[in-house]
Amino acid sequence: MEARVPGQYLRRMPGLDPRAVLAGRPTARPPLGVVVTVAVSSVCLFVALVLLLHDGATGVATAVLLALVPLPLLLAGVLALDRLEPEPPDALVAAFGWGAGVAVLIATIVNSAGLDLVWRPLLGDELGLYATAAITAPVVEELAKGTVLVGLLWFRRHELNGPTDGIIYGSMVALGFATVENISYYAFAADGVLAWTFVMRGLLSPLLHPLCTSLVGIGVATAALRPRGRRVLPVVLGFVGAIGVHAAWNASTAGGLEGLAAAYTLGLGVLVALAVVLHRDRRRIVGLVQEHLPRYAAVGVVGPGDVRMLSSLQARRRARERLRVTLGRGPARAMADYQQAATELAMLHRRHGLGLVPDDEFQARRDPLLLLMGHARVAFTR
């Protein structure tokens, strides 16, 4: 690629869109698979709500409101983890929709069938409900939620660049599932226990599903960076971990305060472990940027100080804010595109170095990223 680039920023060039370049697609339009997933998930969500709320539900509007109250904060927390290399919004929406629609519908049907056909005839009502919660539900729900993550591994493996991506997608699926599940709990809670139910599910344990399904996400993301013959084990281990944590949490209800304390201790342990994984993965990504970006200084897309700026979230944010104040939103948007393209380029080198991307595919993906970075630099260095 030549060092000189046209003065017009790529966003204004007909036929070329930064969003498409960053997503690695010909256009910025969502792929057909995403559209189909969202459509199917929407239908499943409607059916699931009909099944969940068909008999005895009261105050559905209040239940929906209570289920949505913590959601913006939880989504903001998940997306805050995704600032270094943001995932495509359409993929995140599809993941959330799958959890809220397809996964909930599967879990509703299978859990109910297991209770009516297996556990209730064997153990009676009370023990049957407990067995469903402690044995059936963890397996069914984690398999239902994790299926879309396996789909990402199969159809959009290039989006999975490390454990952070797995945690992001797993959390989005789980938040969709938890939101709809909470609607059913709140709708069937009596007036005297509705507030307590909201405190327990909406405020004290909103991270149960994200913590569990994040383990599946880590397994899937690990598999995405392995050769084809070595991908099964990480995925299986991810599902085993998610099902185990979920089952231990649900089973703790029989242990009173001691069981509750044990469940929260386990959840805290998983949360700390995920935080360590996220920290280490961020350092890994920064290391990739520092390793691979300097080679492009010779073609004019990496200037003095750019690698240092790209190595820190704080420095990235300050660079965008400074441009927004001095030059306006356009150059600031160009800087954001530059930062993401540079990160994508570094991780592309990583996948190529692992032998996961052939040379021709590597070049076909690298060149548009370099073109985007070149035009973006013109926009924010003028």
Image (spheres, rainbow, N blue to C red):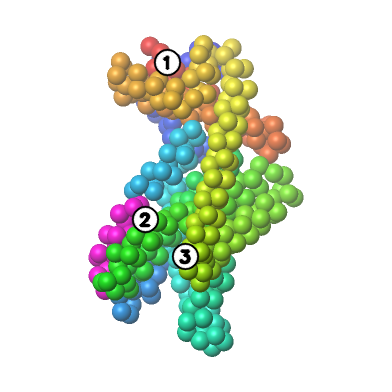
Q: Main secondary structure of the magenta part?
A: helix
Find numbered disc 2 in the image and state the secondary structure of the residue it sits on: helix
Residue flagged by tag 1: what amino acid is it? Val
On the image, which quarter does residue 177 sit in? bottom left
Decide: is 55 above or below 186.
below
The residue located at (35%, 22%) in the rendering is 321
Between label 1 and label 2, give the one nearer the viewer.
2
The residue located at (63%, 60%) in the rendering is 240
Residue furthest to the front: 258
Indicate the quadrant containing the N terminus: top left, top right, bottom left or bottom right.
Answer: top right
C-alpha gap between disc 2 and disc 3? 18 Å
Where does label 3 land, which residue?
257
Sort mark 3 into few (<14), some (14-19) or many (20+) by Cα contacts within 10 Å: few
Where does label 1 land, which residue?
378
C-alpha gap between disc 3 and disc 1? 62 Å
Sort mark 2 into few (<14), some (14-19) or many (20+) by Cα contacts within 10 Å: few
Q: Earlier in the sequence, mark 1 or mark 2?
A: 2
Residue 66 colored in magenta in the image: yes
